[in-house]
Amino acid sequence: MDHSIKSRLLKKYEAGHDVCQTQGENPPMEFYSPFGPMIAKVQMPDALLERINAYADDKVSASEGRELLLPREVSSGGGDASLANHIASMIGRYLAGMENTRVSRVDFENIWIVSQYAGTPSPVHFHTGDISGVLYLKVPQIDEGEEARTYISGRHAGYVNFLIGGKQRFSKSLVRFKPQVGDFYIFPGWLLHVAEPFRGSGERRSLAFNAFVTTEDQPPAERPTR
Ligand SMILES: [Fe+2]
């Protein structure tokens, strides 16, 4: 392979110099955490949330957790403003920011809704596909004091926790985010994550997807098999 093409392809693995933390003492110290997977977060428009919730409202149970596949006519409904288009466009931005590449094709394997009530966990898992994501459609009212509850290894009750690499000193192993309506997280499909159960009232409703991506500079050998 041409050397310049090869170095361009390898460039996507090179991290930037973003400072993730500073210590203001004299002299100030800057901390970098350049390695590992990146998680992106973006807000999804209210109109989209309303459309997906309207579809799901009469299909979820009022008390029991369940999962339902989103039919293609729902994910593709709304023309240019469809859910599938929105997700594909955010995947494009993720790839542009992460690898400085352009996405030429996004194939959704599945898009589904997860409806959960108090006490139900989503155990540690990863997804199929290249890119996955989670969009929060509804969040429950968490009981007072419950937010501070942590599980073994520091995972946080009611939060989505991303995990990597076990425990290693001087290396971060997990990050937690509090589900908020409209928040959309994009991450590599192989990244382990877990939604801890919560204590409280109401429904935690999220939407998840698995997608395969093809990029303009991707050599045929690296293209996903579908
Ligand atoms: Fe997941």
Image (tube, helix red, strand yellow):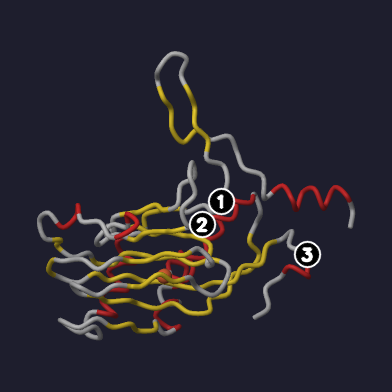
Q: Do the residues bearing badges 3 and 2 touch, measured as CB atoms within 8 Å?
A: no
Q: Which of pointers 3 and 2 lies earlier in the amino acid sequence?
A: 2
Cα–Cα span, label 1 and label 2? 10 Å
Residue drawn at the location 58% of the way across and 34% of the way down: 17
Q: Which residue is mark 1?
A: 36
Q: Which of pointers 1 and 2 lies earlier in the amino acid sequence?
A: 1
In this orientation, does residue 182 appear?
no
Task: Give the total number of marks visible in the rendering.
Answer: 3
Q: What amino acid is found at the position of numbered circle 3 in the picture?
A: Pro
Tell me the quarter of the image containing the N terminus.
bottom right
Residue farthest to the top, as pictured: 26
Cα–Cα span, label 3 and label 2? 29 Å
Q: Secondary structure at mark 2?
A: loop
Front residue of 196 and 178: 196
> Residue 6: x and y, percent?
82, 52
Residue farthest to the right, as pictured: 2
Front residue of 70 and 127: 127
Q: Is mark 1 within 8 Å of ligand 1?
A: no
> Residue 165: x and y, percent?
51, 57
- Whereabouts is ligand 1, in terms of quadrant? bottom left
| Figure check: 177 above or below 108 | above
Q: Which of pointers 1 and 3 lies earlier in the amino acid sequence?
A: 1
Q: Do the residues bearing badges 1 and 2 touch, measured as CB atoms within 8 Å?
A: yes
Q: What amino acid is found at the position of numbered circle 2 in the picture?
A: Gly
* Callout in the foreground (3, 2): 2
> Residue 27: x and y, percent?
47, 14
Q: Which residue is mark 2?
A: 165
Q: What amino acid is found at the position of numbered circle 1 in the picture?
A: Gly
Cα–Cα span, label 1 and label 3? 23 Å
Residue drawn at the location 31% of the way across and 67% of the way down: 49
